[in-house]
Image (tube, grey):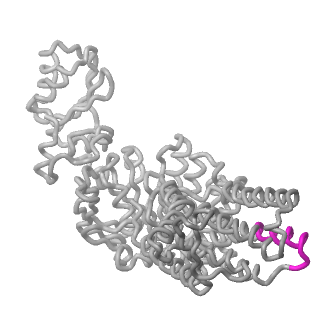
Amino acid sequence: MDETRIVSGNKVPSSLAQVGITMKYTLLDYIRSRRFYIMLTIAIVISVILTFVVGYYRPASFLATDLSFYSGWWGNIATYVIVLSGIFFGGDAISGEFQNKTGYFGIPNPIRRSSIYIGKWLSALIASTIILGVFAAITVGNGLYYFPSVPSEFGLSLLFAWFYLMAVLGFTFFFSSLFKSSSMSILVTAILFLFAFNIIQLFVANFAQVEPWFILTYGAQIIGNILKVPYPPPTSVGNISPGGNGPTLTMYNVTVPEGLAIIGLYFIITAALGLVLFERKEFT
Amino acid sequence: MGNEPIIEVKNLTKTFNDFVAVDSISFDVRKGEIFGLLGPNGAGKTTTLRMLSTLARPTKGTATIGGYDIVENDTEVRKLVGIVSEKMIMYNRLTARENLWFFGSLFNIPKKVLTKRIDELLELVQLTKWKNAQVGRFSTGMRQRMNVIRALLNMPRVLFLDEPTLGLDPQSSVEIRDFIIKLNQENDTTIIITTHMMVEADLLCDRIGIMDHAKIVALDTSTNLKKMISGADTTILKLEIGNLSPNIIEAIRTCKCTDAVSQENSTHLRIIAHGDEAFDSVVDAVRAKNGKINSMENLQPTLEDVFLHITGHQVRDSVEQKVPMEPHGPSAQQKRRIR
C-alpha cells in the first residue's frame, strides 16, 4: 500500500495533462449517453427528410447551382444542429456536477477547476463536432449526387459553423455555471437560442432600425450567407405589401469580419465568465 | 497514533445568509487517529467536513491539514486528503475500472502501480468481477464500496468519511467498518468520520466530538464521555410503563432530579437523573399519575445517554430541529435540558 504513497510523492500531473484526463473520461461519458444517440438520431432524421424532399420534389431553389444546394441544405439547418448539440452537451455540463453530485468526485482532488472546466468544454466540443460532422458528411454525400464537386465556400461555411459551435458551447457553459439546476440551465439556454435571440434580432432590426450586432445568432448568419453569390449587402430595404406602397423593413446582413468578431467575442466573454463563476462556486 | 496534530481547527465558522451551519468550532486531530464527529442531521458535521476537504470555504476561522491552510493552500491540502461522502456520485456510464482510472490519473501514480492498486482495491471490496460493468448498474452498497476505494487510490494521509455506512445493509456496514479499522492500523491513515450512529462512533473512534446545533458540545474519548454521566450522582433508568401517557412523562420531567427523558417506544422511557433520591422520586412521580411500572433497569451509560445528557434531546429528535431556535453556549445548553 505504501508504494502508491511513495511513488506519487504528493506530485500531480500538469494542468494540461489534467485537462486531457478530464476530457477523455467526460467524452466517454458523453458518447455512452442516451442524449448523444438522440442528437445523432435528430441529425440523421433531418438529413433523411431533406434527402427525400430534395430527391422527390427536386426544388429549383436547391438544385439551381451547387451553392444554392449547400445554402438551402446546410445554410438553413446547420445552426439548429449546432444549437441543439450545444444545449445537449453543454446545457448541464457544469450544473450537472452540482445537481448530480458528480462534482464531489472531481473537485476535492488536487486538480484546478479550470482544468475540469476546459476538459469538459473540450469533450462537449468533440461530441458536438461528431454530430455536426455526421450532418456535414450526409450533406456532402447528397451534394455530390447532384453536383460533381464541393464548392470551396462550403469549406468556409463549415469552418464558420465550427467557430459558432465553440461560441454556443461557451454560452451554454456560462449558463451551466450560473445555475445549480440542470433543467434550469438547459431551459434558459434553449429559450435564448431557439426563441429569444431571434425575436430580439427581429425587433431590433425592423422596429428600432438598429443593426443587431450584439446578438450571437446574428453573427451566425455568416454560415449561410457565405454560400450566397453575391454575398448579401450589409443593408437592404424591403416592402411588406405586394404593391410596394406599404411600410418598409430594413434587413441587416452581417459581414464575414463582423460575424467572426461577434462569434469570437461571445466565445471569449461567456467562456471566461463561466469559468469565473465555476471557480467561485461552493459545494454545500 | 502519535500526539502530533495533523489537523488543527480554530474557530471555524460557516454561515449561509443568517443560518449558522458551523459555529466557531475548534479541535485538533492527531496523526493516525480515528476521530469521530457525532451528531444529528443538521448539526454541522458534513459542512465541517466539506470545509476541511476544501469543497466549501469557511466564513470565519482557520484550519490546517498537515500544516497547510485549507483556504490559502487548498491544492496542497487536496494532495493529502481523500473524501468519501454518501452523496458522492460516480460517473454512471463509466465502468468501475474507468471511474477509478479517472480518479487515479489525477495523481502522479505510474500506470503500473495504479493498475496494480486498482486491482488490489477492487479485490479487497469484492468488486473484481464487476470491474468492467457501468457503475450506474451497481447497488447502493456496491457504489459505497467503490466510493471508499476511490478515495484510497492515492493513499491519502487523511481520509474524511461522511456517513460511510448510511443506507447500507448490516453486512456491508460491517465490511466497511472493518476496512476502516484495517486502513487505520496498517497505513497509519488519519480518519475523520461523521456519523449519527452512536454504535458506529463507539466502535471506531479514538476520540469523539459531539456536535449539536453547529457547535462541538463535548470532545473526548468514548470512555471519558461516558464517565461524564456515570459518576456516583447520576442514574440512568429504563422504565417500562404499561399505561404510559403524556401526563406521566411530564410528571417525570418535572421531577427535580430529572436531567433528561427520552421515549424509546410506546411503553419504554429512558431517564437520566441525579441525586440519591432519583430512583424514588421517579417511581413516586409515575405512581402519582397512576402509572403501572412493569419493569425498571439501572443501565450503563451509552453515547446516546451522553448526547441526551449534554443536549437534552436524543439524536433522532434533532432531525426536525435543523435551525437553531435559541442562542448557543453553555448556559443555553443548560436551558435546553428537558426538565
Q: Nearer the viewer, residue A174 or B132?
A: A174
Q: Nearer the viewer, residue A150 or B337?
A: A150
| Quarter where residue B313 is shown | top left
Q: Does the magenta stretch include residue A146?
A: yes
Q: Is residue B117 visible?
A: no
Task: Name the magenta segment's main secondary structure.
Answer: helix
The magenta-colored residue range is: A134-149
Q: Which of A202 and A117 is in front in this view?
A: A202
| Quarter where residue A135 is shown | bottom right
Q: Which residue lies furthest to the bottom in this view?
A: A257
- What count of labels does the image hold? 0
- Up-down relation of residue A119 to residue B55 (above or below): below
Question: In the displayed structure, does residue B206 sit left or right of residue A4?
Answer: left
Question: In the displayed structure, does residue A246 sit left or right of residue A208?
Answer: right
On the image, the x and y values in percent for residue A42 come to 72, 57
- Up-down relation of residue A233 to residue B201 (above or below): below
On the image, the x and y values in percent for residue B266 come to 32, 21
Identify the residue at horizontal 32%, vertical 41% (top origin).
B319
Identify the residue at horizontal 26%, vertical 24% (top origin).
B239
Identify the residue at horizontal 82%, vertical 66% (top origin).
A60
On the image, the x and y values in percent for residue A41 come to 75, 56
Q: In which quarter of the image is the N terminus of chain B?
A: bottom left
Question: In the displayed structure, does residue A6 sit left or right of residue A37?
Answer: left
Question: In the displayed structure, does residue A20 sit left or right of residue B229?
Answer: right
Identify the residue at horizontal 28%, vertical 52% (top origin).
B211
- Up-down relation of residue B141 to residue B275 (above or below): below
On the image, the x and y values in percent for residue A225 come to 67, 77
Q: Quadrant of the C terminus of chain B?
A: top left
- Up-down relation of residue A283 to residue B80 (above or below): above
Q: Is residue B288 visible?
A: yes
